[in-house]
Structure formats: structure tokens, C-alpha cells
């Protein structure tokens, strides 16, 4: 579950939504998450995955949970980066 700090809305995540949430690192574009994660793990066409992913991301964005940007977010270490 994810809760919006703005309006206390709860989102219960299914497997696909959880995969998107976990892959949303501020650097990887949604289009790559769809192809590399969603279409690879789940039996879904890219078109259907794109529609559903965009709807999910838009819902989270409207509730202040996720920031949508045309450019990668810089200044924060990537969670995928290896630490020494």
C-alpha cells in the first residue's frame, strides 16, 4: 500500500503496480520500465502495458505521490548504483 501525504488516499498495489513503483528510480523513463520490466515479467502487450502504466502513474502524480518529469531527476544517488 501507498498513502498520499497530501490527501491520505490509499493505493493498494497489484503485482504490476508494485513493479512500476519499484522501478521508478527518477532516472529510468516509463517507456523503459514498460518494456524492460512489465512486458518481460507479465504476459501483456506493450500497448496495453503503456495505457495501464500511464494511468497508474497519472493517478499517483495527481495525489502528490510521484513526480512526473520529462528529464531524469538529478542530484540524488540512483538506488541501482553500487556502493563501495
Image (cartoon, rainbow, N blue to C red):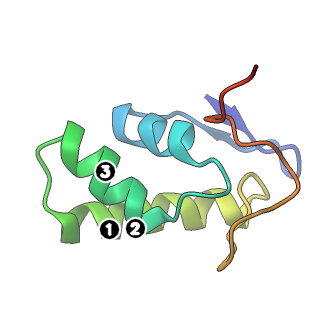
- Marks 2 and 1 sit apart, C-alpha to C-alpha, by 7 Å
Neighbourhood count class around disc 2 (C-alpha, 10 Å): few under 14, some 14–19, many 20 upward = some
Neighbourhood count class around disc 1 (C-alpha, 10 Å): few under 14, some 14–19, many 20 upward = some
Question: Where, by quadrant of the figure, is residue 33 drawn?
Answer: bottom left
Q: Earlier in the sequence, mark 2 or mark 1?
A: 2
Position of residue 74 in the picture relative to residue 54 (left or right): right
Residue designated by label 2: 31
The dot on residue 50 is 1
Neighbourhood count class around disc 3 (C-alpha, 10 Å): few under 14, some 14–19, many 20 upward = few
- Marks 1 and 3 sit apart, C-alpha to C-alpha, by 12 Å
- Marks 3 and 2 sit apart, C-alpha to C-alpha, by 9 Å
**For the residues carrying marks 1 and 3, which lies nearer the camera in this image?**
3
Q: Is residue 82 above or below residue 35?
A: above
Look at the numbered discs 2 and 1 and tell me whether their residues touch, using CB distance below 8 Å: yes
Residue designated by label 3: 36
Which residue is rendered at x = 76% and y = 19% of the image?
A: 84
Amino acid at each position: 500500500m501507498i498513502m498520499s501525504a497530501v490527501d491520505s488516499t490509499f493505493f493498494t498495489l497489484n503485482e504490476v503496480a508494485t513493479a512500476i513503483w519499484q522501478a521508478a528510480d527518477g532516472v529510468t523513463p516509463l517507456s523503459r520500465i514498460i518494456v524492460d520490466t512489465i512486458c518481460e515479467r507479465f504476459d501483456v502487450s506493450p500497448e496495453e502495458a503503456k495505457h495501464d502504466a500511464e494511468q497508474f502513474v497519472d493517478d499517483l502524480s495527481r495525489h502528490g505521490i510521484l513526480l512526473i518529469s520529462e528529464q531524469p531527476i538529478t542530484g540524488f544517488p540512483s538506488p541501482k548504483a553500487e556502493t563501495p
